[in-house]
């Protein structure tokens, strides 16, 4: 099953009650998705590339496309994805404020591999792999702060 297919599953077994849990259990239906791609600036482009190359590899997410500075306002920019670039980082940036990005995993093992590799690549632990039943019963996530301090997560919504 691909990471994208994992997101097309229905609500968790037993359904969900109303409130925030229902929001977290909402699934991506076939058709138009809310986000096409997102990106943010990093203080050290090569350091961030080295980190994300490693941290995202266990999730099957690769660097797919690099935009030359003349096409990106004079900065280095590169995009990661499973089938197309949907997550972008660009250099020369000042980071500001809080940012949270969550990547889809199609198994709990992938979440665990992401967390281990991200820590090995220089990330800081922000929550070990495990269930977060306050979101929904099968929400299995892991959290890491990237080299700029951004809160990066991988999640698996299925029971295994
Ligand atoms: N350390 C917490 C991290 C939880 C967390 O960051 N949750 C996300 C939502 S899935 C969040 O609150 N993001 C907001 C932010 O990072 O500002 C854990 O392990 O559960």
Image (tube, rainbow, N blue to C red):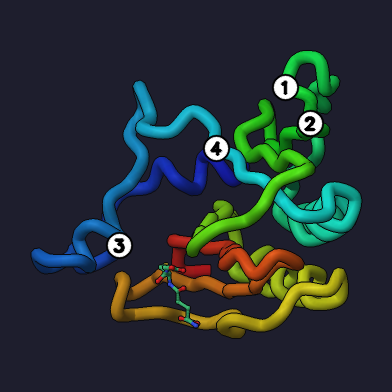
At a point 63% along the width and 39% down the height, the residue shown is 87
At a point 82% along the width and 27% down the height, the residue shown is 66
User: Which numbered disc, 3 or 4, marks the residue that appears first in the sequence?
Assistant: 3
Tell me the distance, in whole angstroms, between the alpha carbons under discs 1 and 4: 14 Å
Q: Quadrant of residue 135?
A: bottom left
Residue 111 in the image: x percent, y percent? Answer: 64, 68
> Residue 133, relative to residue 141: is it above or below?
below
Front disc: 3 or 2: 2
Q: Which residue is mark 2?
A: 75
Give left or right: position of 32 versus 115: left
User: Which numbered disc, 1 or 4, marks the residue that appears first in the sequence?
Assistant: 4
Residue 68 in the image: x percent, y percent? Answer: 85, 20
Q: Is residue 1 visible?
A: no
Front disc: 3 or 1: 1
> Residue 68, relative to residue 159: is it above or below?
above
Q: Which residue is mark 1?
A: 72
At a point 68% along the width and 30% down the height, the residue shown is 85
Q: Is residue 66 visible?
A: yes
Labelled pair 2, 1 in contact (Cβ < 8 Å): yes
Tell me the distance, in whole angstroms, between the alpha carbons under discs 3 and 2: 42 Å
Secondary structure beneath disc 2? loop
Front disc: 2 or 4: 2
User: Which numbered disc, 3 or 2, marks the residue that appears first in the sequence?
Assistant: 3
Labelled pair 3, 1 in contact (Cβ < 8 Å): no
Ligand 1 picture quarter: bottom left
Q: Which residue is mark 3?
A: 12
Q: Quadrant of residue 77?
A: top right
Q: Which residue is mark 4?
A: 38
Front disc: 1 or 4: 1
Q: Of all residues shown, which one is farthest toward the top? A: 71
User: Which numbered disc, 3 or 1, marks the residue that appears first in the sequence?
Assistant: 3
């Amino acid at each position: 099953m691909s990471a994208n297919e994992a997101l097309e599953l229905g609500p968790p077994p037993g359904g969900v009650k109303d409130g925030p849990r229902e929001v977290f259990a909402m699934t991506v239906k076939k058709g138009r998705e809310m986000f096409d791609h997102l990106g943010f600036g990093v203080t050290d482009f090569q350091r961030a590339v080295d980190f994300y190359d490693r941290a995202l590899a266990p999730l099957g997410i690769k660097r797919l496309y690099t935009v030359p500075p003349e096409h990106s306002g004079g900065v280095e920019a590169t995009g990661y994805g499973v089938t197309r670039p949907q997550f972008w980082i660009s250099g020369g940036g000042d980071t500001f404020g809080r940012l949270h990005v969550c990547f889809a995993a199609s198994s709990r093992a992938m979440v665990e591999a992401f967390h281990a590799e991200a820590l090995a690549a220089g990330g800081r632990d922000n929550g070990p792999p495990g269930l977060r039943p306050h979101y929904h019963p099968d929400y299995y996530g892991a959290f890491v702060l990237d080299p700029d301090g951004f809160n990066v997560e991988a999640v698996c919504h299925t029971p295994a």
